[in-house]
Image (cartoon, rainbow, N blue to C red):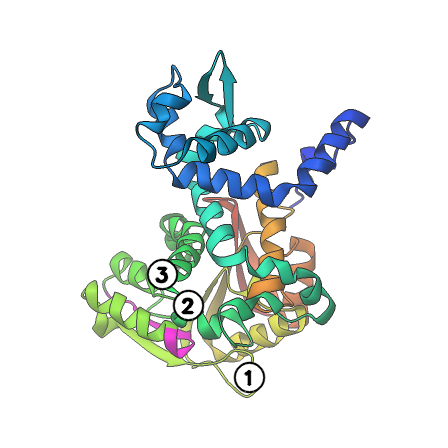
Amino acid sequence: MQVTPVTTPAAKELLPQDAKFMAQFIAMAPFVFQTAVCLRDFGILNLLCENPEGLSADKMLEKINLSRYSLNVLLDAGESSGIVLEKNRIWTITQTGMFLEKDAITRVNMNFSQDVCYQGLFNLKDALETNTPSGLKVFGNWSTLYEGLSSLPEKVQQSWFEFDHFFSSDSFPRALPIVFKDMPKKILDVGGNTGKFAVACTKFDSDVTVTIADHPGQIEMAKANAASNQVAERVHYHVTDLLKKDAALPQGHDVIWMSQLLSCFSDEEVVMILKKARQALGTGGSLYIMETFTDNQKFNTARFCLDMTSLYFTVMANGNSRMYRSEEFYKLIEKAEMKIVEEHPFIRLNHTILKCVPA
């Protein structure tokens, strides 16, 4: 399938005065971001949403627990950032401010940036030079974020899972009919995290059993999730570290499922994991891969968010993975001696599902 490459607004040539403003906007971007976070978290954006006719600073001070000084500097910075507007001493919220306050994707991305990535991003240069997640040290001494995921501070963990689930779990209702078209009875969910897909499978088909392969911490969370959904007897577990070359996947499954997993690994590691999957498939079995390819997006906004997410992998997650372009990813499938037999694009938020079998 040929997809027209997305051209982002930022990639277009600007007039000199606009380009200079854009350069300054980038130079001051940390201030802009923290201004937006504070306007949201102090309730100022919500207050202006509830009063579309606008409010004076005096009226806002009656409801916001800030000094006049603090409110004034936030509002002034917010106006220069395009978040709020002032006319005749009355403040209103802009369309951008509305998205910051009300839009679900924006909120998830903002919390992920603030809680998971912001402090660590200071170490991006070192991460790029060493191909190690240099920013992860703000949370702990792990070689990858996935090793320490279950031990992250509660707020950080919550924002990470909200980000991960928002861009995968909502795709499951459209993915499940594809996966169950051939009525599999045994599914292996590699990188199953908290077990949401496994639980969704057991709800979709009352006879299927699912094995989750993941790190010990994630396995414990998945066990609790399966138990709370009364499907513990049909969900099994395989503790593994996919980066260990001698760590094989359990064999004999009709379907192996990998949702947003392989973008967490380097090219060489992807090929290694795909080879493990090929060896673990039962006779006639299939591998289903769900990923968000940067060149397979309908909208500029989605492409932009995916490219920025690649830097999360660089500085926080593992130091060597990214959101892939489809043509790059297909070559890795070929190297693993697998072939694509079905392609299902634009699942939910522009995911693509690939059905693969041994070549």
As helix, strand or loop, the secondary structure at mark 3 comes to: helix
User: What's the residue type where badge 1 is placed?
Assistant: Lys
Nearest the eye: 259 or 323: 323
Q: Earlier in the sequence, mark 1 or mark 3?
A: 3
Cα–Cα gap, marks 3 and 2: 22 Å
The disc label shown at residue 244, or none: 1
* Residue 210 among magenta residues: yes
User: What's the residue type where badge 3 is placed?
Assistant: Phe
Mark toward the viewer: 3 or 2: 2
Label 1 crowd (10 A; few <14 / some 14-19 / many >=20): few
Is 298 located above or below residue 288 in the figure? above
Label 2 crowd (10 A; few <14 / some 14-19 / many >=20): some
The disc label shown at residue 152, or none: 2
The magenta stretch is 207-217
Quadrant in the rendering for residue 265:
bottom right
Percent position (x, y) of residue 256?
45, 69
Quadrant containing the C terminus is bottom right
Percent position (x, y) of residue 169?
38, 53
